Image (cartoon, grey):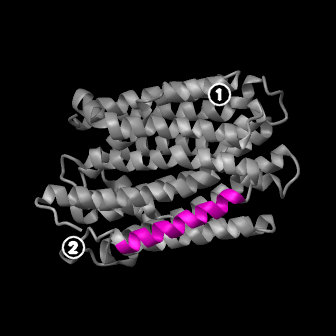
C-alpha cells in the first residue's frame, strides 16, 4: 500500500478505510429491516401482538446498546478504535446467525441481546473520523460517515426486500456473511487512528451510561444541543421502529415495497451527505443548516402520517433532503466543543442517547400503532405515531433557536 505524502492525504485514506467498513456493516443491517417485523409475525397471532413484540425486541436491543455503548466508546479511548470495531463486526455476525436459526420468539431476543451488546460501529467510527479530521472538517467527515450509512441503506433494504420475498430467513444469512467479510476487511486493512500518546486511562466511572449522559447534561455550553439531539433522535427512532408495520397495515406493502422506500431514503441521504453537505455548510453555516433540516423533518413527519396512498411516501422522502444535513451539522457543533482525547467518550455518550431512544420509542410507537391497528386503513389516526414525531421535532426547533441565540453559537 503506497504511503501518503501529506498528513491530509493520510487522514483521507484512513477515513476511506473506515467508510468501507461502515458501508458493509450498514448493508448487512439494512438487509434485515424489511423482514424483521414479519419474522416476528411468524411467532405471534394478530397485528396488535406483532406490533407489541416487535417493539419489545427493538427495546431490548436498545437497552443493551445503552448499557454497553459508553463502555465501548471509553474502551476505544484506551485501547484504540480498531479492536473495538473488530469486536463489533464479530458480534453482529453472530447476531444475524442466531436470528436466522431462531426456532422461537425467545431466540429472536437472544440475537437482539448479542447485537445490542456489540453494535459499536457507528460511535467508534465517528470517534475514528474525529481522530483523523481537522477541527474545521469534522462535520464533513461525519457527513461522509452518514453517506456511507445511507449508501448501505440504498443497497441493503432493497436487496433484503427482494430476498425476503424469496424467504424471510435468507436476508439474515446474507447479512451474517457480509458481517464476516467486514470483519476480515477490518482486520487486514483498517489501521489504528488513535496513537498511544493520545489515549485516555480506562475508568469505571466513564462506563456508567447514566453518568455519561449526566456529564453531557452538566455541560452548559452544549446542554441545549444535547436536548435537540435527543428529541431528533427519538423522533427518528420512532419512525424507524414503526415504518414497516405502518406501511404494511396502512398500504399493505410487501418487503419489496419497503425495500424500495428505504432505497429512496438511502439515496437521498447519500446525495445530501456525500455530495451536497460541504456546499450546504458553506452556503448556510452549520447553525442555519441545522434549523432548516429540523424544519423540513417536522413537516415531513406530519405528511407521512396524513398520507392516503403509498406512492406519497416516496415523494415525501425525496422532498425531505435538508433533514439529512441536520444530523451532521448538530454533531459537528457538539464535537467542536469537546477536546480531541475525549471524542470517543463523547460519541459513545451520544450513541447512548440513540440507544435510550431505542429503549423508549419502540414501546411508545408500536404501542400507539398496536392500539390503532384495528382501525380502517384510511383512518387518519393510523398515523398517530408520526404526529408525535412531528411534535418532538417542533420542540427541537424551539430549543435549538433558543440555544443558538443564548450562547451566540456562530455558524
Q: Residue at x 59, y 28 (%)?
A: 314
Residue 329 x/y as whole percent: 32, 40
Q: Is residue 178 magenta?
A: yes
- Mark 2 vs mark 1, foreground winner is 2
The quadrant in which residue 206 appears is bottom left
Q: Callout 1: helix, strand or loop?
A: helix
Which quadrant of the figure contains the N terminus?
bottom left
Q: Which mark is residue 195?
A: 2
Magenta portion: prevailing SS class: helix
Residue 240 x/y as whole percent: 60, 44
Residue 153 x/y as whole percent: 52, 46
Q: Is residue 145 magenta?
A: no
Q: Callout 2: helix, strand or loop?
A: loop
Name the foreground residue: 14 vs 2: 2
Asked if 306 appears above or below 13 in the picture, the reply is: above
Name the foreground residue: 106 vs 338: 106
Figure disc tally: 2
The quadrant in which residue 321 appears is top left
Disc 1 target residue: 305
Q: Say whether residue 8 is left or right of residue 170.
A: left
Mark 1 crowdedness (10 Å alpha carbons): few <14, some 14-19, many ≥20: many
Q: Residue furthest left?
A: 5
Name the foreground residue: 91 vs 383: 91
- Regarding residue 215, the answer to whether it shows in the image is no
Residue 276 x/y as whole percent: 32, 33
Q: Which residues are magenta?
A: 170-188
Amino acid at each position: 500500500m503506497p504511503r501518503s505524502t501529506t498528513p491530509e492525504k493520510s487522514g483521507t485514506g484512513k477515513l476511506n478505510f473506515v467508510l468501507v467498513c461502515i458501508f458493509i456493516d450498514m448493508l448487512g443491517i439494512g438487509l434485515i429491516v424489511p423482514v424483521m417485523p414479519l419474522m416476528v409475525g411468524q411467532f405471534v397471532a394478530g397485528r396488535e401482538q406483532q406490533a407489541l413484540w416487535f417493539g419489545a425486541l427493538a427495546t431490548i436491543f436498545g437497552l443493551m446498546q445503552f448499557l454497553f455503548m459508553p463502555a465501548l466508546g471509553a474502551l476505544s479511548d484506551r485501547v484504540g478504535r480498531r479492536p473495538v470495531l473488530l469486536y463489533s463486526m464479530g458480534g453482529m455476525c453472530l447476531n444475524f446467525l442466531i436470528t436466522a436459526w431462531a426456532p422461537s420468539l425467545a431466540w429472536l431476543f437472544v440475537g437482539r441481546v448479542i447485537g445490542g451488546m456489540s453494535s459499536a460501529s457507528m460511535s467508534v467510527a465517528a470517534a475514528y473520523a474525529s481522530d483523523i479530521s481537522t477541527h474545521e472538517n469534522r462535520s464533513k467527515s461525519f457527513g461522509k460517515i452518514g453517506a456511507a450509512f445511507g449508501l448501505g441503506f440504498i443497497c441493503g433494504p432493497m436487496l433484503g426486500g427482494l430476498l425476503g420475498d424469496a424467504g424471510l430467513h435468507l436476508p439474515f444469512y446474507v447479512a451474517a456473511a457480509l458481517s464476516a467479510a467486514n470483519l476480515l476487511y477490518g482486520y487486514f486493512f483498517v489501521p489504528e487512528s488513535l496513537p498511544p500518546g493520545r489515549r485516555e486511562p480506562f475508568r469505571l466511572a466513564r462506563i456508567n451510561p447514566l453518568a455519561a449522559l449526566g456529564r453531557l447534561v452538566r455541560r452548559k455550553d452544549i446542554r441545549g444541543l444535547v436536548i435537540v439531539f435527543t428529541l431528533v433522535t427519538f423522533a427518528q427512532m420512532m419512525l424507524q421502529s414503526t415504518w414497516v408495520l405502518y406501511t404494511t397495515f396502512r398500504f399493505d406493502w410487501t418487503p419489496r415495497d419497503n425495500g424500495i422506500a428505504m432505497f429512496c431514503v438511502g439515496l437521498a441521504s447519500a446525495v445530501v451527505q456525500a455530495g451536497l453537505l460541504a456546499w450546504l455548510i458553506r452556503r448556510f453555516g452549520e447553525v442555519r443548516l441545522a434549523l432548516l433540516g429540523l424544519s423540513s423533518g417536522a413537516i415531513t413527519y406530519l405528511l407521512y402520517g396524513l398520507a392516503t396512498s403509498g406512492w406519497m411516501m416516496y415523494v415525501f422522502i425525496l422532498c425531505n433532503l435538508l433533514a439529512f444535513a441536520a444530523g451532521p451539522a448538530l454533531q459537528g457543533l457538539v464535537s467542536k466543543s469537546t477536546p480531541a482525547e475525549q471524542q470517543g467518550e463523547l460519541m459513545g455518550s451520544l450513541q447512548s442517547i440513540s440507544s435510550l431512544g431505542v429503549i423508549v420509542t419502540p414501546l411508545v410507537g408500536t404501542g400507539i400503532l398496536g392500539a390503532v391497528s384495528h382501525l380502517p386503513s384510511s383512518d387518519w389516526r393510523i398515523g398517530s405515531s408520526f404526529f408525535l414525531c412531528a411534535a418532538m421535532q417542533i420542540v427541537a426547533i424551539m430549543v435549538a433557536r433558543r440555544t443558538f441565540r443564548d450562547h451566540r453559537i456562530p455558524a
